[in-house]
Image (cartoon, rainbow, N blue to C red):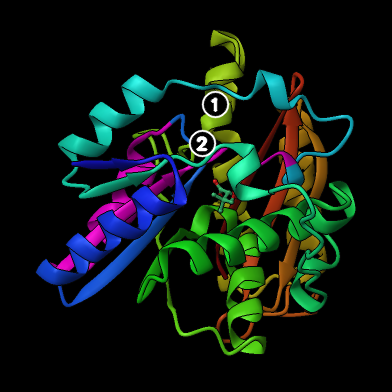
Amino acid sequence: MLLARTLPELRDACAALRSRYPLLALVPTMGALHDGHLALLRAAPPVTGIVASIFVNPLQFGPSEDLSRYPRDEAGDLAKLKGAGCHLVWLPDVATMYPPGDATAIEVRGPAERWEGDARPGHFRGVATVVARLFGQVRPDLACFGEKDWQQLQVVRRMVADLLLPVEIVGVPTVREPDGLAMSSRNRFLSAEERGRAPALHGALRGVADRLSAGTPAGPALTAGRAALFAKGFDVDYLELVEGETLTPLPAPETGSRLIAAARLGGIRLLDNIAA
Ligand code: PAF
């Protein structure tokens, strides 16, 4: 497995991979890797050179969000990537990603508005900007993103479509713990007692989906889902039925619609979503 920490190293390593593989896939990460990230690597077609990036992107953290608390474990991450068949790891530092004089950011509207866009002002600007830069640096043919961050996936798809970027976006289904909790780097911050209650988020989404399938109107089905979460001690930021691509609220399920939720348990904000 190759490592690159500077743009010249990345250029040489990508050229070496391109001479061996017809396609390059990028798996962008912020490290603290778990099986959900490794599933992104496995989603690449077999004849693909796989590049994973590890960069904790300061631009996507708000002033009230603790960037310094974000878990970092480079040695552990590299071992996991090697075990999962990664060919090249791109490890830029902040000055490489945002050099002095840098003056360009990407602002996506549409799917970036509402929900996480409201809760975390500037977050998707940071995500879109770093993802566009990673695409410019690595120039992948395809890039894999988890459905766990459904809104992020739609923001990236919108950006790629609007800017005609020559990269195929592959959405990868959420990887869950046996009890249904979506894998996330944030789960490690849950206390043992909170970890026991955390699967209720997925349970509430499933409960709403079952009610909708049984013909309950969306309003009462969503109210019941929120109530189930309150009963488990969650503070619910939102639990909504939305159109899958635009994230606009829907009065009833339709093809491609999604149930999305964000709820806090202790200080930890958990996100999840399922098809509806
Ligand atoms: O999902 C993440 O880990 C990050 O938002 C991403 C896509 C790597 C951009 O920093």
Report whether 58 appears left or right of 255: right
Q: In which quarter of the image is residue 142?
A: bottom left
Q: Residue furthest top?
A: 192
Q: Which residue is drawn at 67% across and 19% down?
A: 69
Q: Quadrant of the C terminus?
A: bottom right
For the point 76% across and 68% down, which residue is it?
Answer: 106
Image mark for residue 184: 2
Q: Which of 134 and 172 is in front in this view?
A: 134
Residue pointed to by mark 1: 187
Amino acid at circle 1? Asn
Residue 211 appears in the rendering: no
Which residue is drawn at the image coordinates 72% and 72% (left, top)? 242
| Residue 38 in picture, x, y percent from top left | 30, 44
- The part of the chain drawn in magenta is 33-58
Q: In which quarter of the image is the N terminus?
A: top left
How busy is the neighbourhood of tag 2: few (under 14 within 10 Å), some, or many (20 plus)? many
Cα separation between marks 1 and 2: 6 Å
Tell me how many marks there are: 2
Q: What element carries label 1?
A: helix
Picture layout, residue 51 above or below residue 186: below
The picture places residue 274, in percent across and down from the top left corner, at 54, 60
* Label 1 residue near ligand 1, CB within 8 Å: no
Q: Dot 1, crowdedness within 10 Å: few (<14), some or many (≥20)? A: some
Instruction: For the residues labelled 1 and 2, say whether their Cβ atoms are less than 8 Å apart.
Output: yes
